[in-house]
Image (spheres, rainbow, N blue to C red):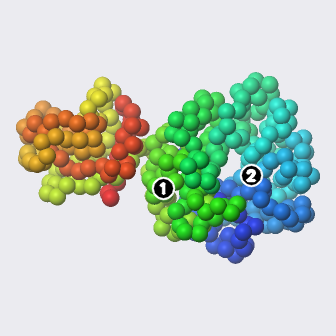
Amino acid sequence: MKRRLGVSVYPEHSTPERDRDYLERAARLGFSRVFTCLLSVKGSAEKTIEEFTAFIRMAHELGFEVAVDTNEDVFRRLGATPEGIGPFAKMGVDIIRLDGHFGDHGDIMLTRNAAGIAIEFNASSNLPLDVLIERGADPRNMVVCHNFYPEPYTGLSEETFQVLSRKYRGMGLPIAAFVTSRVHGAFGPGPVFAGLPTCEDDRRRPIGLQARHLVASGLVDDILIGNCEASDEELKELSEVDRSRVTLSIELEPGVGEEERQIVWGYQHVTRGDASAYMLRSSWPRIDYRGTSIQPRDAGCGTFTRGDVLVVNDNMQHYRGELEVALKEMPDDGTRNLVGRIPEDELFLLDYVKPEHPFGFINC
């Protein structure tokens, strides 16, 4: 299943015209999910249903699937219950996200709703969803989505994100998580403007790197922008992220030869299964460079360090053409040319490149 991209829209803080313009721009770039929030909406049930029915109809016209964030208070205010979700069906909601819960019986009944609306549980909480499934919840109608965190330094740690996501991945449930726009003034449902990511370390990263982190984890199906509105540049950057593999930026060294450029850009790199602690190895280029010279070039450093991208040269002909990425310090013995470096702020992505996994490079 292809990872989908989504945006968040908060109609109570915007206008229908502005929302349509934003969704049209996102749709043109392949975005197909919308997250919105009913927790902060204060109007009457009738007004809320009317306004969100119009909003969701417009989103559907543009090809979006719509998830609404809810809790017990929202259900009560709209006149809905776990056994009767008519107001959400009337609005045309595709996914009901539960910020709160209705007890085991209520949650189970929600997954069995006759309208076929998917129920989205909070992936940032340690929930016994496996027990619910054993007791009758319909896993075909269950998805999970992580929280976003408006307050700086409160987002999920990498360890917590991994533990919780692996738990739900083990149940076979689709997982969504949030990245954040870094545009000044981008807003969420509440009065905090410090970004809305799932993982705290993503809060200060460019949006493309945030997404590449989630892709690299292998634990996220859908990537949503938590705040509104991302810039056109951010939407484009996110749409261009390769969602099929780990990708790393590379800063090429001056004087890199055409053969070395072809090795960097011209191959689908895959790490070897017999993995080394010192480097990632992509050996397929060796086949094509058995009879092609790669002249040695002095790196001038004496020692290669983590993140250095290397190509084996003529001084080790049997391995000539192999692309390697240093994982720890090792001496420059003259058999490898330094062709580029992975930027410091992206070195953490190397931890996600597992044996026999694909990876690739993007130009800084």
Q: Is residue 213 above or below residue 20?
A: above
Q: Determine the image quadrant of residue 48.
A: bottom right
Q: Quadrant of the C terminus?
A: bottom left
Q: Is residue 59 left or right of residue 160?
A: right
Q: Mark 1 falls on what kind of element? A: loop
Q: Nearer the viewer, residue 73 or 294?
A: 73
Q: Residue at x 76, y 48 (%)?
A: 96
Q: Circles 1 and 2: CB distance less than 8 Å?
A: no
Q: What amino acid is labelled 2 in the image?
A: Asp
Crowdedness near tag 2: few (<14), some (14–19) or many (≥20) residues, C-alpha within 10 Å: some
> Residue 101's x, y, as percent?
80, 40
Q: Is residue 70 left or right of residue 64?
A: right
Q: Nearer the viewer, residue 201 or 11?
A: 201
Q: Does residue 102 show up?
A: yes
- Label 1, on which residue? 204
Q: What amino acid is labelled 1 in the image?
A: Arg
